[in-house]
Amino acid sequence: MTSKIGVLFVCTGNICRSPTAEAVFRHKVRLAGLETRFLIDSAGTHGYHTGDPPDPRAIATALERGVDMRDLRARKVETQDFDRFNHIYAMDRGHYAMLDRLGGAGPLSMFLEENADVPDPYYGGQKDFDRVFALVDAACDRLLAALQDRYLL
């Protein structure tokens, strides 16, 4: 683990849900003046889109809300991530199960409260991307507050 607090968000292809969470969390951490305290990243359980930017609909949805994720690129999660990150957040139960098999439950948690899934907006429309952004935004507020309490930031 690094000396920074490592936070990794994971979805399927790393082009919709997890990069949205990464970008929103980075934005909130920056606003809190804590960017030097965190290592924040996202990844996918599959390498379908490795090297690609986030889905254009996810980018547009985030930009409309003041969050820029255009610089992010998809990557596949690696076993080393379980050593690099203190906290790994699965976007849904399927991701959780895959991550559990890959590296064990150590730093692994579901992203949303009550183990709810963040729905995949990929095959949906704008309302689905809006819903995902709203879920992620609220969850990132809770996550940052919880980590600030835990690490006394």
Image (cartoon, rainbow, N blue to C red):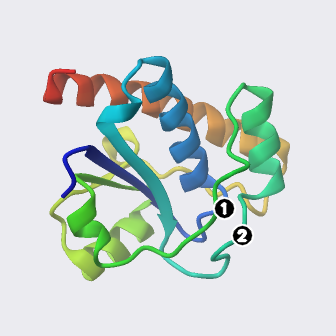
Q: Are marks 2 and 1 in contact (CB under 8 Å)?
A: yes
Secondary structure under badge 2?
A: loop
What is the quadrant of the C terminus in the image? top left
Identified by mark 2, the residue type is Asp
Q: Which residue is mark 2?
A: 52
Q: Residue at x 25, y 31 (%)?
A: 147
Q: Quadrant of residue 51?
A: bottom right
Identified by mark 1, the residue type is Ile
Residue sitting nearer the eye, 103 or 4: 4
Mark 1 burial class by Cα count in 10 Å: few <14, some 14-19, many 20+: many
Side of 139 relative to 69 (left or right): left
Q: Residue at x 35, y 28 (%)?
A: 144
Numbered mark located on residue 15 in the image? 1
User: In this rendering, does residue 148 appear at all?
Assistant: yes
Secondary structure under badge 1?
A: loop
What is the quadrant of the N terminus in the image? bottom left
Residue sitting nearer the eye, 7 or 30: 30
Mark 2 burial class by Cα count in 10 Å: few <14, some 14-19, many 20+: some
User: In this rendering, does residue 91 appear at all?
Assistant: no
